[in-house]
Image (cartoon, rainbow, N blue to C red):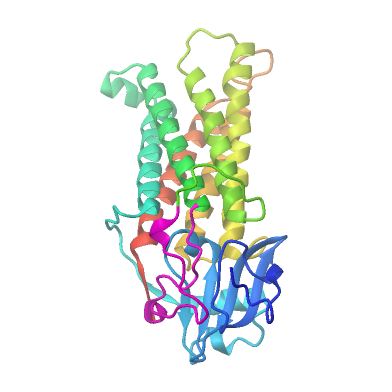
Amino acid sequence: MALMADRTPATDLPPHVTFPAHWEHVATHRVGRFITRVIHRLPDGGLHVWTSRRHRKRRGAVIQDSAGALSQVASHEHVGQVNAASKSVRQHFRLWGWRVESLSWWIGLIFIIGSICFVVGTVPTAYPGVLDWFGLQPYNYALVCFIGSVWFTIGSYLLLLEALNTDFDATVQLKAHELERYVEHKPQDQRTRRIRWMGFAGNRLDYWIATVQLIGAITFNINCGMGLVEGMNWVIADILVWTPSTVASCFFVTASYLGLVEVSHRKWAWLWWDVSWWINFFSLLGSFGFLISSVVGYFGQGPLQMPQWLGNYFALMMGSWFFLFGTYLMVPELVSEDCD
């Protein structure tokens, strides 16, 4: 793997990506020890902006010509200045599109299905009149939530699969620079690489996002499965229902926040123009909705009780809606195209 050892320290480049040696390294942005963005100057004077999420989603890098706003930034080491300049990169936003050959597209679709299940299962809990209108029992909606949790687990594993099998060649899918390849050798043929079904990549933020999300989803399966059991007393319910729900929600909050860090390239930033930022922001709101519901759920029975409608049922329903908003945007994020 040629990492421009004579010009750029290996610690300034992501460990799973190879850049052409004749590109000039400009800046590396990281949060903690995790690299989230790398900027190179191309031979024609333009800037190649590699980011962790875009690379994982096979969207290619952002290419800014020498007259672009990003090229005029005084210091590319300053994350805030680069974030602000990124507003100049516009998109042809599309509400929907089909990319059935893309793993990222299927991940979005699977999460959408899971989110719809949660919405269908939690709205009647917050508004019991819906149950009466459909003439169904609460068990039916609890079953829908369990099915939704299974879809979320499948999607979460595919997130891990996506992270473990990212493209090693930074020059693939780069618009006008798509034909630019290594000077020293021919790039690796991506079709010959074996799929990594499991693995460890502790030095990459995208790996930890997927891993934390998967652990949370598996734990949430326990909560939703136990929710189908009727007749539990409050002690057993706290142990088997609300404890895994609380633990899973904490994992969801962590994964969502790490997702925001990945696209913000700092501990916090408001990137309201970036659809990737909104995906993770809605996911964070949904995770907090599930967490609030779980904590309040502890006090639905027993010696100390709290009102359940607002803190539990309504919070869970709104969390489901926020998850649906965020997961839906995963498809427009993939099918929308950048424009100069």
Q: Residue at x 38, y 58 (%)?
A: 191
Which segment is the magenta one?
A: 165-193
**Please, is residue 73 above or below residue 100 in the view?**
below
User: On the image, which quarter does residue 206 sit in?
Assistant: bottom right
Residue 171 is one of the magenta-drawn residues: yes
**Please, is residue 4 above or below residue 222 in the view?**
below
Q: Residue at x 55, y 25 (%)?
A: 308
Q: Position of residue 177 (x, y in %)?
A: 41, 81
User: On the image, which quarter does residue 312 sit in?
Assistant: top right
Q: Is residue 329 left or right of residue 209?
A: left
Q: Residue at x 37, y 42 (%)?
A: 110
**Please, is residue 309 above or below residue 81 in the view?**
above
Q: Position of residue 306 (x, y in %)?
A: 62, 24
Q: Nearer the viewer, residue 275 or 206?
A: 206
Give the total number of marks visible in the rendering: 0
Q: Position of residue 287 (x, y in %)?
A: 55, 42
Q: Is residue 165 left or right of residue 239?
A: left
**Please, is residue 323 above or below residue 102 in the view?**
above
Residue 116 is one of the magenta-drawn residues: no
Q: Residue at x 27, y 23 (%)?
A: 134
Q: Residue furthest front?
A: 185
Q: Position of residue 274 (x, y in %)?
A: 48, 66
Q: Nearer the viewer, residue 126 or 272?
A: 272
Assign the N terminus to one quadrant of the image. bottom right
Dominant SS type (magenta) = loop
Assign the C terminus to one quadrant of the image. bottom left
